[in-house]
Image (cartoon, coloured by chain):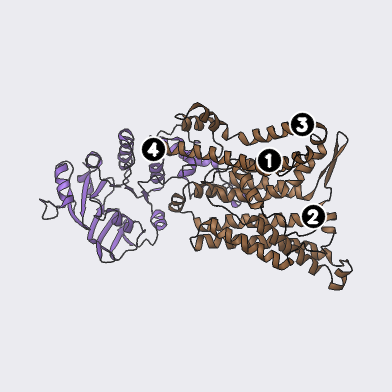
């Protein structure tokens, strides 16, 4: 269903001919990748395949060496992750990048605090009521259940904390959400909660790039699977037709995929 | 958000033995309890001379400088740092303030005759120079910690030596003589508000007003402003703060600058209260301020702490010393008692952290 819609659309984010070296290591080799509105793209690959490097180049964490990044039809250059965020690209990291001693509201607005109007605002006084209201709206829209918005995150479960991290990303991502192993630290039930969130985000039209090692998770949630191996994209799979064995074969190189299968249009 | 709630303590302590669970639960409120217990012991033992308005007035005046140092220390420790230099910076600031004050209050001949014709200029500029000295030391601490990626423990330990040595060089190693006495008589001891309680005079002096205004403003800043929020966020998870776009290094420089500035203010207060800059005392004020903050519930691991807790924490050594003197016990017991309370406070904090990590 998602595939037929995509072909008609322009990619939100597109990487063309990306190369990256770390000393003698050729970490990314001529990588082309597109992200279309309303899809979940899974990016899979073995350790060291270049998944995180690719994401870091796309979000301005690492400088672009050669190639180009096209964002909403225009060539862009992000020199820092803040620039990428200013363009509406948000990243969720695997290691629960929240401040555990702050509550959900403070975490969601961290670095983007709403200040009071007038002189108190200039003095740095926070508008906690407004931040709380906006958080409430956002969490209920995403159906994330946080028992008490004013409780510090140390008291929440890992899944609830990751829910807050995802809610934060979604709240500010107007264009793309990137999730780097968001379920790596979570149990089964909590993982299910995060996967539900990913679908809900996708259904609002915002594409999700989902990086994971967990093949069952990938096949549960992805509309399209991109396989990286040794810095190259070696396959693009349709989870409806391909099997987990196909994906593992592509990742490890014992491959039946001598040619790259392209599921999307040019 | 900053106060640990009962539900939180129940959650993190549910798998501890009963007595430890009990201890952890009272840990958030145990500082005032200890303070009240100490006061009760002295009050029962020496009712007439301890439990009176005049004596409590003295305790409040005596604790004013430690309150100011503890406020700065609380911000630093919430960011998971430490500032060992505050006592030395206090000394250097008061020596600079005294020297500038003397130099601007008259010609050397005037001063030799103990006359201060231009003290109207000398006193305010001298006090400002003292505060500025503290600020400079604090900015230097923050810049070295963030730019050279050095542990705050080492940088501020270095600053402890540097500031103390400079203070001793400037003063020749002794108390600075010939400070205009009006700084003490007209400012430090001035009765701004005075009233009688049960026949005893209670005097509110500038050091008290300065200390509690600073504590009040600091509490508001920590709880209600973006500056406070960033302070907690950095101590809680510096990497997350950085990813969220907070300029962590800039904020840390501001926090160390604040601690230095408040040490400078405490130095100026010293000059006001005692009318001289003494290099002999205050050398263990750093440990007193750290103890006050930690006993008051600030976590050395960062992310947790309140100004109110630190103010109460700052009262404990002062009350102990005062009570021990009145009860004619050797006041050196104060050090023993503070040491024990400090160890207990850190022990409770660690238990809380370990319980958190198990979740």
Place of residue A85 in the rendered image (x, y in percent of width and height, measured from the top left)? 40, 53
Question: Which disc, if any, is residue B45?
Answer: 3
Tag 4 secondary structure: helix
- Mark 3 and mark 4 in contact (Cβ < 8 Å)? no
In this view of the protein, which residue sits in the foreground, B76 or A75?
B76
State which chain disc 2 sits on. B
**Label 4 belongs to which residue?**
A158
Q: Quadrant of residue A222?
A: top left
Cα distance between the residues tagged 2 and 4: 55 Å
Write the residue at 65% across / 48% down: B288
Q: Which residue is mark 1?
A: B316
Q: Secondary structure at mark 2?
A: helix
Of circles 4 and 3, which is in front?
3
Identify the subunit bearing mark 1: B
Q: Which chain is purple?
A: A
Q: Is residue B39 above or below residue A106?
A: above
Give the position of the N terminus of chain B as an image quadrant. top right
């Amino acid at each position: 269903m998602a595939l037929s819609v995509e072909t008609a659309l322009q990619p939100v984010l597109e990487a063309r001919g990306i190369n990256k070296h770390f000393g003698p290591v050729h970490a990314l080799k001529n990588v082309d990748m597109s992200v279309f509105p309303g899809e979940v793209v899974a990016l899979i690959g073995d350790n060291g395949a270049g998944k995180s490097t690719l994401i870091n180049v796309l979000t301005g964490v690492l400088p672009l060496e050669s190639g180009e990044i096209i964002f909403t039809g225009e060539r862009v250059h992000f020199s820092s992750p803040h620039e990428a965020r200013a363009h509406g690209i948000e990243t969720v990291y695997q290691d629960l990048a929240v401040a555990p001693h702050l509550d959900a509201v403070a975490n969601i607005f961290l670095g983007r605090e709403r200040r009071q109007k007038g002189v108190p605002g200039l003095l740095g006084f926070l508008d906690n009521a407004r931040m709380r209201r906006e958080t409430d709206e956002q969490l209920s829209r995403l159906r994330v259940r946080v028992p008490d918005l004013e409780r510090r995150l140390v008291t929440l479960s890992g899944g609830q904390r990751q829910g807050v991290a995802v809610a934060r990303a979604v709240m500010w991502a107007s264009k793309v959400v990137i999730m780097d192993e968001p379920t790596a630290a979570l149990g089964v039930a909590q993982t299910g909660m995060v996967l539900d969130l990913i679908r809900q985000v996708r259904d609002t039209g915002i594409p999700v790039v989902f990086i994971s090692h967990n093949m069952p998770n990938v096949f549960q949630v992805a509309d399209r699977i991109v396989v990286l191996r040794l810095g190259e994209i070696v396959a693009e799979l349709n989870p409806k037709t391909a099997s987990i064995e196909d994906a593992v074969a592509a990742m490890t190189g014992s491959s039946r995929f001598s040619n790259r299968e392209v599921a999307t249009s040019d | 958000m900053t106060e640990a709630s009962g539900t939180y303590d129940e959650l993190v302590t549910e798998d501890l033995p009963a007595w430890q669970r009990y201890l952890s639960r009272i840990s958030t409120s145990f500082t005032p309890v200890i303070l009240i217990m100490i006061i009760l012991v002295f009050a029962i033992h020496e009712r007439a001379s301890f439990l009176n308005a005049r004596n409590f007035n003295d305790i409040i005046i005596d604790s004013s400088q430690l309150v100011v140092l503890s406020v700065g220390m609380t911000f630093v420790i919430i960011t998971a740092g430490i500032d060992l230099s505050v006592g030395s910076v206090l000394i250097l600031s008061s020596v600079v303030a005294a020297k500038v004050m003397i130099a601007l209050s008259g010609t050397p001949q005037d001063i030799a005759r103990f006359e201060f014709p231009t003290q109207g200029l000398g006193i305010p500029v001298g006090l400002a120079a003292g505060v500025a000295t503290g600020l400079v030391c604090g900015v230097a601490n923050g810049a070295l910690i963030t730019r050279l990626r050095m542990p705050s423990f080492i940088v501020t330990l270095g600053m402890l030596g540097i500031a103390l040595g400079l203070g001793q060089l400037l003063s020749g190693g002794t108390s600075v003589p010939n400070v205009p006495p009006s700084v003490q008589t007209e400012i430090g001891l001035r009765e701004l508000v005075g009233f009688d309680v049960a026949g005893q005079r209670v005097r509110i002096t500038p050091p008290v007003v300065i200390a509690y205004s600073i504590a009040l403003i600091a509490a508001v800043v920590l709880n209600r402003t973006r500056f406070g929020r960033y302070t907690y966020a950095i101590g809680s998870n510096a990497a997350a703060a950085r990813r969220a776009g907070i300029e962590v290094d800039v904020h840390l420089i501001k926090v160390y600058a604040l601690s230095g500035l408040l040490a400078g203010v405490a130095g100026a207060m010293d000059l006001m209260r005692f009318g001289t800059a003494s290099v002999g005392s205050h050398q263990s004020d750093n440990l007193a301020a750290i103890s006050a903050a930690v006993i008051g519930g600030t976590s050395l691991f960062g992310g947790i702490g309140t100004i109110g807790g630190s103010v109460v924490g700052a009262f404990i050594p002062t009350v102990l010393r005062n009570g021990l003197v009145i009860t004619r016990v050797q006041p050196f017991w104060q050090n023993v008692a503070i040491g024990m309370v400090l160890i207990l406070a850190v022990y409770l904090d660690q238990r809380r952290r370990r319980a958190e990590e198990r979740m």
